[in-house]
Amino acid sequence: MPEVTDIILSRRSVRKFTEEPVENKEIKTILEAGRWAPSGLNNQPWRFIVIKDKSTMEELATCTHYGDIIQNAPLLIAVYLDLDVMYNRTKDVQAIGASIQNMLLACCDLKLGAVWLGEILNNSNKVNLILSCPDTLELMAVLAIGKPAITVTATARKDLKDIAYCEKYGMAF
């Protein structure tokens, strides 16, 4: 079984997928990972909409510059913040980010590719109409998921000395 750190370090954003469907068992595993993210007061402010219908995907593809990714993916998960259970916007948005990261790591562990799409937020009203969402849900992201069609290599990361400091913010870690 892979170590958590190994999964974190091997996760990559995958934007090209095979046509092979994502199995329901895998979808449930991904959703469970998202469900178990930490949240303030354990309010669990996330809501997920699973999208597999190609005609819905075609409509959603018109909502973003990255429509080709959406049309190519066999699975989308729209991630929402439930405004009815929100108690602190900053904490709840951070919890949504943790939930998304958990789902991306679960995809990696399942040997699935995934990418976090944020630019689609520019057309969140149109997305909400397509998905028939109530006004109490605020779109946070769409995840495109599938079997990777290509191998994605690591991107550069900043050195720790450039981003981590000791408590007086002067000495690099």
Image (cartoon, grey):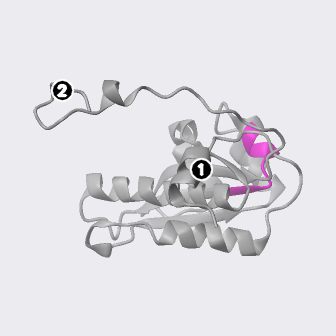
**In this view, the mark in front (1 or 2):** 2
- Toward the left, the furthest residue is 168
- Toward the right, the furthest residue is 19
What element does badge 2 sit on?
loop
Residue nearer the viewer, 145 or 12: 12
Q: Which residue is mark 2?
A: 171
Spatial separation of the CA atoms under disc 1 and disc 2: 39 Å
Question: Which quadrant would residue 112 be assigned to in this image?
Answer: bottom right
What residue is shown at x 54% (from left), y 68% (from top)? 33
> Which quadrant of the rendered structure holds the N terminus?
bottom right
Residue nearer the viewer, 136 or 87: 87
Residue 127 is marked as none
Amino acid type assigned to the residue bearing label 2 in the image: Met
**Residue range highlighted in magenta:** 69-76
Decide if residue 21 is on the left or right side of residue 94: right
Decide if residue 172 is on the left or right side of residue 93: left
What residue is shown at x 46% (from left), y 72% (from top)? 36
Amino acid type assigned to the residue bearing label 1 in the image: Val
> Which quadrant of the rendered structure holds the C terminus?
top left
Determine crowd level at label 1: few under 14, some 14-19, many 20+ residues with C-alpha closer than 10 A.
many
Decide if residue 20 is on the left or right side of residue 92: right
Residue 165 visible, this angle:
yes
Query: How many numbered tags mark residues here?
Result: 2
For marks 1 and 2, the one nearer the N-term is: 1
Residue 165 in the image: x percent, y percent? 22, 32
Decide if residue 136 is on the left or right side of residue 163: right
Residue 137 in the image: x percent, y percent? 45, 61
Residue 142 is marked as 1
Determine crowd level at label 2: few under 14, some 14-19, many 20+ residues with C-alpha closer than 10 A.
few
What residue is shown at x 31% (from left), y 65% (from top)? 86
What residue is shown at x 55% (from left), y 36% (from top)? 119
Pointer 1 with pointer 2, Cβ within 8 A: no
